[in-house]
Image (cartoon, rainbow, N blue to C red):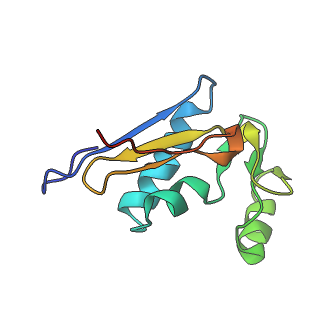
Amino acid sequence: IETPMNKKIILGSGGSKRIRSSLVQVISNLIDFKMDLSTAVHSPRINWDGHALHIEKGFRPEEILKLNKKVNTNQWEGLDFFFGGVHCIDTHLKKAVGDTRRGGCGLVLKY
């Protein structure tokens, strides 16, 4: 992602059919909700698999109740590997974040 102020954020994820939804949710967290890198990556996610809406723990219960009336849901107990691992680098702030769902960590090396 490159902003008009020339700020660059680089994102990636390991292979699975959930890559797109994981990346879009992190990008939305960064841009729409103005979250910092770590919060954006470690916020709960959802995923529609064609049969049920999978929901990580952390969403408001009243919103989940509304969803339960419209679609089949599968609520997870916490953040899970199933929802993919998104890893990010902010080149402007010189920060890196690895998704703990996949054992990730972020490290910036200075040379």
Residue furthest top in the image: 15
The correct choice, above or below, for 29 with respect to 26 in the image is below
Task: Tell me where residue 85 sits by quadrant.
Answer: top right
Q: Quadrant of the N terminus?
A: top left
Quick one: 83 or 55, which is closer to the camera?
83
Please state if 79 lies on the left or on the right of 6 as rendered: right
Quick one: 10 or 104, which is closer to the camera?
104
Quick one: 69 or 80, which is closer to the camera?
80
Q: Position of residue 21 (x, y in %)?
A: 55, 40
Residue furthest left in the image: 5
Total number of numbered labels?
A: 0
Quick one: 20 or 80, which is closer to the camera?
80
Q: Position of residue 66 (x, y in %)?
A: 74, 69
Please state if 48 lies on the left or on the right of 89 as rendered: right
The correct choice, above or below, for 30 with respect to 97 in the image is below
Please state if 60 lies on the left or on the right of 91 as rendered: right
Q: Give the residue at x 45% y 57%.
A: 37
Residue furthest bottom in the image: 62
Task: Tell me where residue 55 sits by quadrant.
Answer: bottom right
Q: Give the residue at x 51% y 34%.
A: 20
Q: Give the residue at x 69% y 40%.
A: 103
Q: Position of residue 15 (x, y in %)?
A: 60, 22
Q: Position of residue 45 (x, y in %)?
A: 64, 53
Q: Quadrant of the C terminus?
A: top left
